[in-house]
Amino acid sequence: MRKPIAWPVLIAVVIAAASLSAHHSFVVFFDDEKIIEVSGIVTDFRFTNPHAIISLSAKNKQGQVESWRAETNAVTLLRRRGWTKDSLTVGEAITIEGWPARDGSNYMRMRKVTRADGTVLGTAVTNQRVDQ
């Protein structure tokens, strides 16, 4: 007689597989051959895992306001680079330098954030594949 499948184990395996597939490769989503800069006003800063997210409103070349989002490293890595949950505030003017989304959307992977006064926030990523 066969023993019944241990449902808790099966559920744990399914959840683990789903979480592994949810994490993505940098080069699948971002163009590591290009670096762009977007300047704007912070509209939100989520200092959460798996990646913190910076949202901002920025004017495009035609002067129209667009919403942008920048994905950062995990919170633990940001802390090592000098970031805190209070590093950015809504309404603050910043410039984000980073790698653009491959799909052309207003989404990027953050490399460096510079405040309006020229101060670089934390330490910049120099090599995405090494400094994650």
Image (cartoon, rainbow, N blue to C red):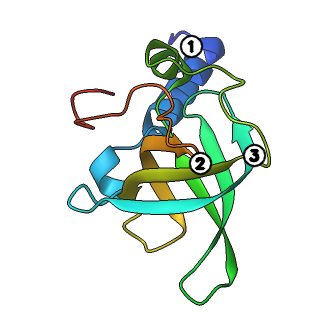
Residue 32 place in picture, x, y as percent: 24, 55
Quarter in which the C terminus is drawn: top left
The answer to whether residue 114 is left or right of residue 33 is right
Residue at 41% x, 52% y is 97
Do callouts 2 and 3 mark residues in contact (Cβ within 8 Å)?
A: no
Residue 29 place in picture, x, y as percent: 38, 57
Of callouts 1 and 3, which one flags the residue occurring earlier in the amino acid sequence?
Answer: 1
Q: Is residue 87 or residue 4 the one in the foreground?
A: 87
Camera-nearest label, 2 or 1: 2
Residue 53 place in picture, x, y as percent: 61, 42
Choose top left, top right, bottom left or bottom right for residue 64: bottom right
Residue at 31% x, 59% y is 35
CA–CA distance in space, label 2 to label 3: 17 Å
Choose top left, top right, bottom left or bottom right for residue 33: bottom left
CA–CA distance in space, label 1 to label 3: 39 Å
Of callouts 2 and 1, which one flags the residue occurring earlier in the amino acid sequence?
Answer: 1
Label number found at residue 44: 3
The vertical placement of 118 against 101, above or below, is above
Looking at the rendered structure, the kind of residue marked 2 is Ala
Q: Is residue 124 or residue 31 the one in the foreground?
A: 124
CA–CA distance in space, label 2 to label 1: 52 Å
The vertical placement of 126 against 90, above or below, is above
Residue at 59% x, 34% y is 52
Looking at the rendered structure, the kind of residue marked 3 is Asp
Looking at the rendered structure, the kind of residue marked 1 is Val
Q: Is residue 54 or residue 28 the one in the foreground?
A: 54
Task: Please tell me whether mark 1 sits on a helix, a strand or a loop.
Answer: helix
Query: Badge 2 is on which residue?
Result: 116
Residue 65 place in picture, x, y as percent: 70, 77
Task: Please tell me whether mark 3 sits on a helix, a strand or a loop.
Answer: strand
Task: Please tell me whether mark 2 sits on a helix, a strand or a loop.
Answer: loop
Query: Badge 1 is on which residue?
Result: 9
